[in-house]
Amino acid sequence: MAPKAIPRDAGFTLVELMVTLVVVSVFLFYAVPSFTQLYRNNQMTNQANSILGAVQLARAEAVHLGKGTAVCGSSDGSACDGSWGTGWIVFVDDSGNNTAPPTANDILRTATLKTGIDVATAGLFRFTPQGTRWPEGTAGQQSLKTVTIKRSTCGNEKARAITVEPGGRASAEEVAC
């Protein structure tokens, strides 16, 4: 009768653990910066889509209400300050010459976001009661054609440009930072 073999304890050897740690370290070395860039790009895309939605809402409300409307960048949700990267205000602007909402009752919708987007074109988009963009250069009725948002430290990401055509059609696209 042959003696029975003593079973070996199940587990990992020190060499196996060290190899696993090296493989995980190399993976994290390359993956973490990529995830950071992905997060920053998603933030930029999210804010551009938020602004685009606000522009489309302002146009729709102008037609619905039969009054001029406007949308502008705002960091506090109550005054236009050109901070498109942190929020916006949609408001009734029937005369087409206000630079900020005249009263709280004229504000239709606001959004305030906390992002790292800190560089943007100042100004606002204005819409006529027919849903077209106010013409550029008309006294008292200046209306932006394009707003560009980006970070002061762009890195590898692209800036976003939100453009409104004279007929009122709005679009967003990636542009060079």
Image (cartoon, helix red, strand yellow):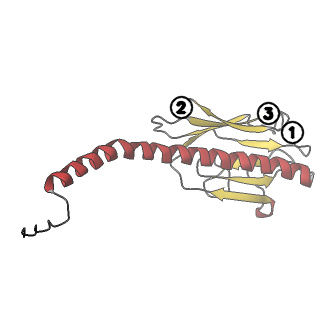
Q: How far separated are the C-alphas under marks 1 and 2?
A: 29 Å
Q: Residues within 10 Å of mark 2 (few under 14, many from 20)?
A: some
Residue 99 visible? The answer is: no
Q: Is residue 175 left or right of residue 66?
A: left
Residue under label 1: 132
Q: In the picture shown, does residue 12 fall above or below 151?
A: below
Horizontal and vertical percent position of residue 159:
57, 36
Label whose residue precedes the other's in the sequence (1 or 2): 1
Q: In the picture shown, does residue 164 fall above or below 72?
A: above
Query: Which residue type does callout 2 highlight?
Result: Cys
Q: Nearer the viewer, residue 165 or 104?
A: 165
Q: How far separated are the C-alphas under marks 1 and 3?
A: 8 Å
Q: What's the mark number on residue 177? A: 2
Q: How far separated are the C-alphas under marks 2 and 3?
A: 22 Å
Query: Which residue type does callout 3 highlight?
Result: Glu
Q: Quadrant of residue 117?
A: top right
Q: Is residue 46 left or right of residue 11?
A: right
